[in-house]
Image: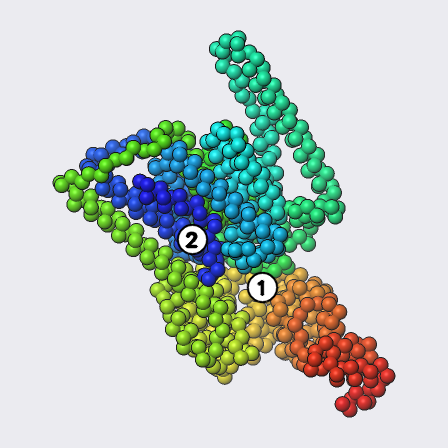
Amino acid sequence: MKLTKFFIFAVAFTPLLYKQNIIYPYLTGKLFFLRFVIELALISFIAYKALSINSFEEFKKDLRSFFGVYGKNILLLALLAFVVSMAVSTIFAINPYRAFWGNLERAEGLINFFHYLILSLLMIVLFSRSDWLKFFTISLGVGMISIFYGFLQAFGMMNFPFMPHGGDIKRVGSFIGNSAFFSAYLMLVIAVAGIVVGFISKRWLKGLVYLVMAISLGMIFLTRTRGAIIGLGAGIFVLLIYFAFKKQKLTNPEADASHRYGAGLQTYKLINRRAISIILLSLIIIFGSVFWFTKNNDVWQKIPGFDRLAKTAFINSNDASVQTRLIAWRSSLEAFKEKPFIGWGLEGYLTAYSKYYDPAYAVYGETWLDRAHNKIIDVAVMQGIFGILAYLALWGLLLAAFWRQPLVLAALVAYFIQNFFVFEEINSYALFYPLLGFAIASWANRSKPEESPKKEIKINPPTHYLQLSVAGISVFAVLIFAYFYNYIPYVQAKNANLIYNAQATSGNQEALLQELQNIFYPYNFAQSSIRTTLTDRFYEAKSDNRFVFENPELQLLAQSLENAVDELIAFEPLYDPRFYIRKNQISFSRAKISDSLKFYQQAESASREALKMAPQRQEVYYGLAFALAGQNRVEEAIQAAQSAVELQPNVARAYYHLGLMRAISKNKTEALKAFEIMFKLSPDLSGLFSSDATGLIVSYKILGAFDKLGDLVIKRIEGKIIISISQDDYLLTLKYFTDQRDAENFIKVASYLAQFSNLKDDMEILIDLAKNGNWDIINSL
């Protein structure tokens, strides 16, 4: 059993794993490590049991013993009910394959929850008091290392050894990579610390654990995660309520008079604790009121955590983070109404959200949500009423299990509340399910010895073939699974990262194609993440100053990537609209270097398929408009762009595409009108993508609207907009301002161009001429 426990203890190190040379560096390594060590723990446990049980009767006796202790454990039953609800929703999911396997990006799926369940059950069966203490102590150590690196990040010490890179550079994420996930993980670290305090008796050790709690609290504020701070406030509130009003027996009623003074001292301490709790509770209420009424004061912007909380405005449309969540939650409610009982299936939120997407979301951006950023809503949409009832029952019983441990109770309340603003992920699961296992074991009140007695393995001749067969088959099955669904996807993800960082050229195209074959096959659950990541990378990459898909010399590579997307669509149809959007983008790009209309037709077909899944998603209409325009079906293209506008008339990018289609039709008046509305909705053009600037400039050129192009250039020079404008276009506007005899703007543009060494001397001459009004000389140059 020591080997099994060793692998279980290894689980505690999961949050520290970070691997730079793999896609999703904060998640992928953790996923395969966690799965593999749990599988190894299961192998060693099965092998031990198969070899140590000498008869079928002994096996039945062990089962009766387990069910006798845990068969009526309602917390374990709630956990099993929750997992059963996952299984049922997976069977009837929109995409059962994805529901079962999950993906690399979220590291969930039914198979991973089976691993967490196995972890909890193994800990319940095997762990003694000392084992629980050892596991949680290791977890505290891991938490402290994560916090240490979090502080280094907060103070900008990014060159420290083993420092992870690539996460949110503005907020602390440590080895978790995301500040919201990091703060959620820290709440569970605090809960673990509360458990450890109950295990130890030495005051200095207790003091050390309390220090870990305090440091974790401080780090949560440094993450500046609003949901976590709200959860933390709820946890502290519960803790103070607990101490203020919970009854406690002070003395043994049979104690003699000699203990009277001790009882009096204990009474005093209890009264003192209650008084302090009530006072602190009152101060928190007062502080909360003051904060609410003064949150616009600049002083709050100087306090980590409270700075972002002070900016939160549930009724202010300018708070994009809040508004997008509220919009998404409304869409989720509509999706829940369609499948209220067993939900859309695990990993089905994206499909559900796409169908009931609210076009108002596009006012704040075009993010695709595969989670609701609310765990309760996630469970409701993906698992239905059955799932949400099981989940709430599980949480209610979990909190009840720790009712006599107020620090743990408060930390878990904080974690539960912050789940209203974020979804769970692997770092939290690696602590939550061991906590759940501990609660189940504690609820059963099973007294286990400090060290389980060693049992000598004896194989009886009559049964040794059966024992060895069971052990061998079980080990072989788990190893086969580990090879095909851990090792191979891991190698594919690692090699995909090498290709991701490669520069595609005609010289290395053959080598890239060969490597892609090894990365794309065999097809497994990781392929959706790998293929979409690489496709997006090469769609945006340039080779010889041309985009890969638009480079005639790289069409073999383009075809390979397009085939990869086609296979995703064929294997998982009508699941993810983004598959079809990628197909549209690839086909449209390849059409630019082809005389055939087939690529535009493929782009149109892909967009129409995407519309079946996301009928109110504006960017699908944008892609359709381009595909139609490429076939010279301009009026239909305009109608597609107009449909996007009609979905939500306050989206700047929708008017940009309408103006672009109007420009293609040479309707200058209507095109400029659309662009004017675009500027009103987004004066700094922050509502557009960086690539949209090219289309806007080209439109002005097509329409001969050089006055508008000049205005655009001047705004860019003055810093009112941040877009990319080529040097040739600056020179073009310089010519326009020359024709207009506009000395002020001419000098502004010339002064800007004088910053470039190749134009400096010429621009200085032109500036002098413009200042003196020598326009004829300027025209002659």
Q: Secondary structure at mark 2?
A: helix
Q: Position of residue 602 (x, y in %)?
A: 47, 74
Q: Is residue 581 left or right of residue 362?
A: left
| Residue 450 location, quadrant | top left
Q: Residue furthest top?
A: 257
Q: Position of residue 89 (x, y in %)?
A: 41, 48
| Image: 347 above or below 570 | above
Residue 778 is at least partly visible in this image: yes
Q: At 59% from the left edge and 21% from the top edge, which residue is drawn?
A: 269
Q: Which mark is residue 618?
A: 1
Q: Quadrant of the N terminus?
A: top left
Q: What residue did someone put label 2 on?
A: 31
| Image: 8 above or below 20 | above
| Tag 2: amino acid | Leu
Q: Residues within 10 Å of mark 2 (few under 14, many from 20)?
A: many
Q: At 55% from the left edge and 11% from the top edge, which residue is drawn?
A: 260
Q: Which mark is residue 594?
A: none
Q: Position of residue 495 (x, y in %)?
A: 42, 65
Q: Residue furthest left?
A: 462
Q: Position of residue 311 (x, y in %)?
A: 68, 49
Q: At 18% from the left edge and 44% from the top edge, which residue is drawn?
A: 466
- Earlier in the chain: of badge 1 and badge 2, it is 2
Q: At 54% from the left edge and 18% from the top edge, which residue is drawn?
A: 250
Q: Residues within 10 Å of mark 1 (few under 14, many from 20)?
A: many
Q: Quadrant of the C terminus?
A: bottom right
Q: Secondary structure at mark 1?
A: helix
Residue 400 is at least partly visible in this image: no
Q: Is residue 711 left or right of residue 555?
A: right
Viewer-proximal residue among 678 and 67: 67
How is the rendered protein coloured?
rainbow
| Tag 1: amino acid | Gln
| Residue 122 location, quadrant | top left
